[in-house]
Image (tube, grey):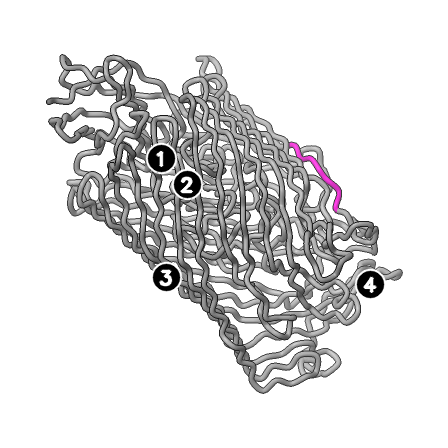
Amino acid sequence: MKLAFTLIGCVSATCAVAQTGTVRGRITDAAQAPQIGLVVRLENTALGTATDVDGTFFMDKIAPGQYTLIVSGVGYTAQKQNIVVQGGLTTQLQLALDKEQQVLQEVVVTERRAFETSAGGLTRTNTPIKDLPQSVQVINQSTLRQQQVYRLDEALRNAAGVSETSATGNYGFRGFTTNSQSFLTNGIKGIGNPEGVMPFLANVERIEVLRGSSAILYGEGAVGGNLNLVTKQPKKTTAVNAGLSGGSFNLFRAQADVAGSLTSDKRLYALAGVGYERGGRFTRDFEHRTVQLFSSLRWEPGVNTSWQVNATYNRDRSTQRGVPDLPQAAGQLFSVPDNFRVSAADARYEGDSYQLQSQMQHRFSDRWAANLWLGYAKSRADDISYSIRSTLDSTGSFSRGRTQQVRSAPTRTLNAFLTGQIALAGTEHRLTGGLDLAYENADYPEGLRLWRAAPLNVNAPIYAAFNPAEINDPAKVRYVSGREKFTNNTYGVYVQDQVTLSPKFKALLGLRYNHYYFRYTADELTYDLVDYQQLKETPDNTTALLPRIGLVYQPTTSNSFYVDYNTGFVPQYSNSALFGGPFDPELTRQGEIGWKGDFLNHRLVPTVAVYQIQKKNVLNFDNEAFDLTGDVLFRALGGVRSRGIETTLTGTVLPGWQLIANYSYNRTEVTDSNVPEEIGGELANTPRHLSSFWTTYEFSQPALKGLLLGSGYRYTGARYSSTRNPGDADVLTYPGYGIVDAVVGYRYRQFSLQANGNNLLGKRYVRSGLFNSYFAGTPRNFLLTLGYAL
């Protein structure tokens, strides 16, 4: 029997990854019944998939150009049809089985979208988001470009339920903090930035926000949520992007990348780019420079084999890592100007990082493929920083600490996994199984040194460098060590099954065995005048068996309901006896129910998620010990519960009119503690309310064609500076705040000119903080960008 199709119609779907395209379609018979299990692939590429129980198929990250689409199935003769894929667009096909027609007609789509409807970070398969029993949101290149954001903290204002918990790369997902070193790049652990530095996004195409645990594929790590940064991909056709920006606080930014084929048969193609940023920090006398080099090379020696290599280098030079903090008076914020400087003249941050990835795939057939992913990353940072050690006294003075360290952190990862599709007893199964290894070290070859620095008076600050004569002064020395080393090794094996039970029911099942090894050693350590000749802690060996089960019910093509149960574990980030350890690992259980909609031919996509997360052995800063002695100590809370709801609405309401809206409510509280007064307490930096809204309109009328107008609002609710116990009125509250942003732009052929304004109402606010200090929000600022795209 031959496969033959008639094109019924064509509608635009979602905006694909910038400068790559997407092919999405549905295959039915003449009576509109879906055709299941047909293999769909692009000839002479490694791209392929199969139709699901709805008859739909999806392929993304496709370089712009002309392709031959091949559709085949058991008992059918394969049919071919030429199609055109355009960068930044989705080629949408609606095909019907027809015994008379013998070709697949070409489709051209001309609309862009502000959102994505698929993500691969959660399952390692290109699965439509509506088929996943978990909350996933994608921030694509269109949004990043409209808002002109190049730092991760700026991009995440578009995601529901994500808050900033520090100014050095930590974020809160559903009430729990995730360190940026746990994030993923192209599905591989690590982001290639030095610790404590906000990731620079010149090389990033889109950001996948994975809410809840993703422990099945990635093992230990973030349980409230995680991020997958998808980098810009190589292209077979020539593409050039460049931009120059200038703005407030002496900001200058430049970026450019070029892509194309290196051989005439287009089997070897690449991308190379550079990003540069200088200034942009509002702190007085604060220097900042970032350089990023990135490249990607893809080789397709045969139809079924591909090998891609990604490389990134970052160079950061600043007065201090992260965003400088500010002192507070007891119970009072904004006692100093937002641009006040805490660091002395000898403060510096010099960071360099490298990341190299190798991703190989071989398809044995249209249904089975083997993958081998390798990653190597290394960062080195030379850092002298000043910290705030007390609140302001009546004279306007506060105490400071001085830290000096050199940190080298290499990471090696291996992921080997098999994907396949089988039919069993009337059900379809998309299987993923494999193993992964991760070897991570944090090495301080010159040790870690902390001194008591000279106090600073905000009324008459003196920024003299630290006196070398005081380096060995017992009254100044707080902590000095020889070489310190942290070793973190993990390996795991896992299996995952995406089951299509019927046209309306789907399931996601998974099981993982994980082993974790941690060890800390230090030489010649002195802490509070106590000498330790050598400190070698007993290695921490932890194993865990992590199941998950999720079910999706789709009564119609526009509605998807799901329920999910997930587990996870996180080894403690501080197990040293000097800081209160060792501690048992965090254990997590999460339940989630939700709904995802898909209306107006994919133009409007709403979601709702309701969740509860229960964690045991959550480390909490010991406030009393710090207040009494200044010691940094932790205690493990017996239980912490997070409950909340998240809603999102994304869409292209009318041609040219795009919107992204989010709202989340979360309450995180202590449910078990050996200190009864803590039960019912709320954790620090966990706002109950978060919301954001962003909308743009691009005119298509001849007189105004190319004109872009947009605006947005983002709100963060009140938070506490430390864990607040019931009835505790002494804990400082950071007030909630709302920020208004806007954009005006114009595009003519390959050129664009865009002006962005942020915090237009000049709101003074706190981004995050802890105890004695806080991080001020960026004041009103403007940015002008000239762009070119070919």
Question: Residue at the front extreme?
Answer: 425
Left or right: 400 with respect to 272?
right
Q: Is residue 708 above or below residue 186?
A: above
Mark 1, residue position: 19
Viewer-proximal residue among 134 and 157: 134
Residue 402 image position (x, y, % from top left): 67, 70
C-alpha span from label 3 to label 4: 50 Å
Mark 2 or 4: in front is 2
| Residue 461 screen position, x and y as percent | 78, 62
The residue singled out by tag 2 in the image is 205
Residue drawn 75% across the image and 68% down it: 625
Q: State which quadrant residue 366 falls in.
A: top left
Question: Which residue reaches farthest bottom?
Answer: 533
Q: Which residues are magenta?
A: 734-740
Closer mark to the observer between disc 3 and disc 1 = 3
* Amino acid bearing label 3: Leu
Q: How many discs mark residues in the rendered view?
A: 4
The mark found on residue 437 in the picture is: 3
Circle 2: residue type = Glu
Looking at numbered disc 1 in the image, what kind of residue is underneath it? Gln
Q: Is residue 408 visible?
A: no
Q: Is residue 735 magenta?
A: yes
Question: Where's the N terminus, which quadrant?
Answer: top left
> Earlier along the polypeptide chain: callout 1 or callout 4?
1
Mark 2–mark 4 distance (CA, rounded to whole Å): 46 Å
Residue 207, relative to residue 444: is it above or below? above
Position of 478 with respect to 519 (left or right) is right
The front one of 210 and 737 is 210
SS under mark 4: strand
